[in-house]
């Protein structure tokens, strides 16, 4: 740390501070998005590395000659070489006054050597990719984000295999600077063979990486032999150019530049990844919102339809009562006449006649209509629940069928879990729906309301009985008044007057009955409809709340990520211009 900071200019210091801030912000954003432990660790690691020595990492397929290359570079047989997959762990070569080795982690060893170049940079040997031992590749892939500069070694006898291509793409994603080394050029008999291979490598790295990628053909074997006492081989090893490049590339400024670019590239890779995840999540939520809108619209439509149809059904009930009133008027017209004066004194007979001719079928008809209305209401409520369940089921299915891309496992879990639980609530309502009970509740409510507001005293014997009682009481009252008057003063003028008042009273009673019935049914209906809608709302509320809250959060993260990406662009330009 001390070493690294002591060599920074003021401008570099400022840039380093800006970069650290950017990385810290990014950590916060990723935490909010629930980034994986792995991604957090990677970012943290690359931040930590800003303080460490420059890391030159050697990668490539097994047997390409990575270990041999490092041996040649350092001029000694430090690392084990072999034709089979040989290197099994990441070896960091560091400067040390004496030679010794350290196990940092099971797959991360440190080798200390008193070699001059290691005072300025650390060199890393990695296990080969594409080996039968898959673990080797994993170890190396995990280490790649840490590197400041990647030396990609490919063997001249099988350059640029498919697996190398894949691996290079990964390295590129992390925003790493890559240099390609074609090793083992001593296997060629002629210069033209070599030239052919180089042309092939040049072409491929230009398409895969970019045209400015440097390519160095070398023989690590000859270089090491030269350094160990056979200088004649130096020329043919072609190591000179490469060493000069490493020396130049690793001058102070270039080293600082690459060092600064490293966490920036790692950060940007994560940023891009989580921006994509954020967009995927928002897309998913947009579809969720659409579904909730659909449900909302459907419920509004449901309310309108129900209200309209309820009015029609109520008018039916009302008409039955109006018909009864008409019959009552006619009955009084015919009955409250002088010729029938003795009949009128028979109160029971009048009551029976009235019941038979006026009341008639009315109570049953009304009861029938009201029951139909209640059944209709209950069925409609149930159908809404079924439709909600179907919506949720469909949403889940759509989600499974459509490939939205990665949204992060925790987010997916939360959301799926919620849809499931909301779906289950709806499903439970549908399954446990007791139509008879629901209908009975409404019917009793209506009957109670009518009975309570009527003058008559009625037990809970059904709406029809209530209506009969109310109607016949009207008749009995009319005859009662008449009978008393008849006894007191039998007069020609009295009967028409009583007829008028009987009609009037009947009209009043029926009006009161109609009003009571209509009011109580309307109140009951509205109460039921509201509570039906309310229950549905309550059931989906957790889902609604979740997507509202998530969307707000995601919009925030998205703008933060977008802003961070802009800052990335600025920092990158500044670092490249150092
Ligand atoms: N002809 C020739 N053989 C070489 C050269 N460099 C290395 N080799 C041989 O290639 C084989 C593999 O070398 P290593 O250095 O072990 O290769 P590696 O890439 O480290 O392999 P892993 O550790 O298994 O990933 C060994 O037998 C080396 O002797 C070279 O420049 N020319
Ligand atoms: Mg090796």
Image (spheres, grey):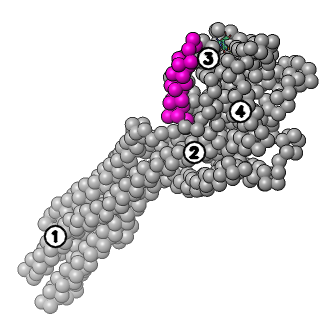
Tell me where residue 133 appears, x and y as whole percent: 61, 14
SS class, disc 2: helix
Please tell me which of labels 1 and 4 falls first in the chain.
4
Q: Is mark 1 within 8 Å of ligand 1?
A: no
Closer to us: 299 or 564: 564
Mark 1 or 2, nearer chain start? 2
Dot 3 falls on a residue whose secondary structure is helix
Where is mark 4, residue-wise?
245
* Front of the two marks 4 and 2: 4
**Is there a contact, CB below 8 Å, between mark 3 and mark 2?**
no
Query: Which residue is more in the foreground, 351 or 307?
Result: 307
Mark 1–mark 2 Cα distance, whole angstroms, equals 77 Å
Mark seen at residue 323? 1
Determine if the magenta segment contains residue 195.
yes
Q: Nearer the viewer, mark 3 or mark 2?
A: 3
Q: Which residue is mark 3?
A: 185
Q: Locate residue 110 relative to residue 490 in the image: left or right.
A: right
Tell me which label, 4 or 2, sits earlier in the chain.
4
Q: Are marks 3 and 1 in contact (CB under 8 Å)?
A: no
* Mark 2, residue position: 272
The magenta segment is 188-209
Q: Quadrant of residue 395?
A: top left
Q: CA distance from mark 3 to mark 1?
A: 111 Å
* Label 3 C-beta lies within 8 Å of the nearest ligand 1 atom: yes
- Image coordinates of residue 484 in percent, x first then y, are 24, 81
Predominant secondary structure in magenta? helix
Q: Residue at x 57, y 30 (%)?
A: 168
């Amino acid at each position: 740390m001390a070493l690294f900071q002591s060599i920074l200019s003021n401008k570099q210091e400022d840039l380093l501070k800006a970069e650290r801030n950017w990385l810290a912000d990014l950590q916060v954003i990723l935490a909010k998005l629930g980034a994986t432990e792995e991604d957090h660790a990677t970012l943290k690691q690359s931040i930590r590395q800003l303080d460490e020595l420059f890391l030159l990492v050697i990668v490539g397929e097994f047997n390409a000659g990575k270990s041999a290359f490092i041996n040649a570079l350092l001029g000694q047989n430090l690392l084990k070489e072999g034709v089979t997959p040989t290197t099994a762990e990441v070896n960091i070569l560091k400067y040390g006054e004496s030679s010794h080795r350290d196990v940092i982690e099971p797959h991360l060893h440190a080798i200390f050597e008193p070699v001059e170049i290691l005072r300025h940079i650390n060199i890393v040997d990695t296990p080969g990719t594409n080996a039968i031992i898959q673990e080797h590749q994993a170890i190396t892939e995990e280490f790649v984000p840490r590197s400041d500069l990647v030396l990609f070694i490919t063997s001249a006898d099988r350059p640029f295999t498919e697996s190398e291509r894949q691996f290079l793409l990964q390295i590129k994603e992390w925003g790493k600077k890559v240099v390609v080394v074609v090793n083992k050029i001593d296997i060629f008999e002629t210069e033209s063979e070599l030239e052919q291979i180089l042309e092939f490598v040049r072409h491929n790295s230009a398409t895969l990486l970019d045209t400015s990628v440097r390519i160095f053909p070398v023989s690590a074997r000859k270089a090491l032999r030269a350094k160990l006492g056979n200088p004649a081989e130096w020329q043919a090893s072609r190591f000179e150019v490469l060493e000069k490049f490493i020396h130049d590339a690793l001058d102070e400024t270039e080293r600082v530049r690459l060092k600064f670019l490293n966490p920036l590239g790692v950060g940007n890779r994560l940023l891009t990844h989580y921006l994509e995840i954020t967009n995927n999540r928002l897309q998913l939520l947009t579809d969720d919102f659409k579904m909730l809108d659909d449900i909302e619209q459907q419920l509004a439509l449901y309310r309108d339809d129900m209200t309209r149809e309820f009015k029609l059904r109520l008018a039916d009930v009302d008409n039955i009562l109006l018909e009864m009133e008409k019959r009552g008027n006619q009955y009084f017209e015919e009955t409250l006449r002088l010729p029938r004066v003795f009949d009128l004194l028979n109160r029971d007979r009048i009551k029976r006649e009235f019941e038979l001719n006026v009341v008639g079928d009315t109570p049953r008809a009304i009861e029938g209509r009201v029951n139909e209305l209640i059944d209709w209401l209950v069925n409609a409520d149930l159908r809404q629940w079924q439709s909600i369940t179907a919506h949720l089921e469909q949403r889940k299915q759509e989600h499974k069928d459509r490939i939205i891309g990665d949204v992060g496992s925790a987010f997916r879990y939360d959301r799926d879990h919620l849809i499931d639980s909301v779906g289950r609530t709806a499903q439970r309502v549908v399954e446990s729906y007791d139509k008879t009970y629901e209908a009975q509740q409404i019917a009793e409510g209506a009957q109670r309301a009518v009975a309570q507001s009527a003058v008559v005293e009625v037990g809970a014997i059904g709406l029809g009985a209530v209506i009969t009682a109310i109607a016949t009481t009207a008749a009995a009252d009319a005859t009662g008044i008449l009978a008393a008057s008849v006894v007191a003063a039998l007069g020609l003028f009295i009967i028409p007057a009583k007829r008028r008042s009987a009609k009037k009273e009947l009209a009043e009673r029926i009006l009161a009955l109609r009003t009571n019935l209509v009011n109580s049914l309307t109140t009951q209906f509205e109460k039921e409809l509201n509570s039906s809608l309310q229950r549905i709302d309550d059931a989906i509320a957790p889902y609604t709340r979740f997507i509202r809250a998530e969307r707000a959060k995601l919009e925030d993260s998205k703008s933060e990520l977008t802003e961070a990406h802009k800052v990335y662009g600025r920092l990158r330009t500044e670092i490249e211009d150092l």
